[in-house]
Image (cartoon, rainbow, N blue to C red):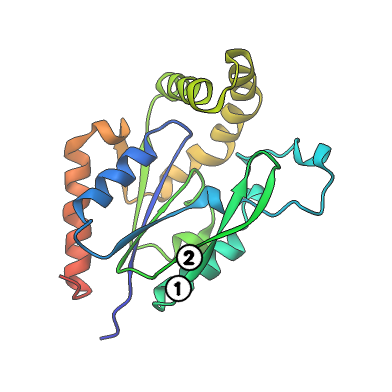
Amino acid sequence: MVRKPAVIGVAGGSGSGKTSVTNAIYDQFKGHSILVLEQDYYYKDQSHLPFEDRLKTNYDHPLAFDNDLLIEHIQKLLNYESIEKPVYDYTRHTRSDKKIHVEAKDVIILEGILVLEDERLRNLMDIKLFVDTDADLRIIRRLLRDIEDRGRTMDSVIDQYINVVRPMHNQFIEPTKRYADVIIPEGGQNVVAIDLVNTKIQTILEQKSFL
């Protein structure tokens, strides 16, 4: 049997706790061959656009992502080929000239708000997770993150949430919950759900003769 890496998709809204879930899975299998591939590294290159137009980018819309490149990279990793992961420059609102060399591993965690939106991505996954957290917790986490880590004002974060993040979540992210194999309420705080997911991942790896 030809060995192929296992692909774990982790989706959910902004501030839902996707990163906490991803880290919990990664820590469980870090003695194994594992990597994390973040969808938000794959925003489209916008260097051909004037800076004023780049400022209008809706980063919560499916069309903001270069899923063609992401899928190409996952397929390479599935064949145990290395990739050069793009880096996005949020100050210039376009792709950076830098790239990150990524070696193939036996487990690929694909994490991002819309990783379950594209059927082509879903078809590459062995297990699909959706981190489901109440909107009030998500907006509080986003407020704290953007104010403390990104130097944003409270008014700008709230305005963006009301006019962009919330409608995009309702239109594009929330509906992808129906594609999930497992829904994890409250993100990384749900130890029981994460333990169950880790057990399932271990079963997948055993079936693939990795363990």
User: Total number of numbered labels?
Assistant: 2
Of circles 1 and 2, which is in front? 2
- Disc 1 vs disc 2: Cβ atoms closer than 8 Å? yes
Residue, disc 1: 82
Percent across and percent down for residue 152 are 59, 21
Residue, disc 2: 101
Percent across and percent down for residue 177 are 42, 43
Percent across and percent down for residue 68 are 61, 64
| Residue drawn at (60%, 49%) of the image | 88
Residue 143 lies left or right of residue 68; in this view the side is: left
Q: Is residue 105 above or below residue 155?
A: below
Residue 99 lies left or right of residue 188; in this view the side is: right
Q: Quadrant of residue 206?
A: bottom left
Residue 80 lies left or right of residue 199; in this view the side is: right
Q: Quadrant of residue 53?
A: top right
Type of the residue with mark 2: His
Of helix, strand and loop, which one carries label 1? loop
In the orientation shown, which residue stands out farthest toward the front? 98
Type of the residue with mark 1: Ser
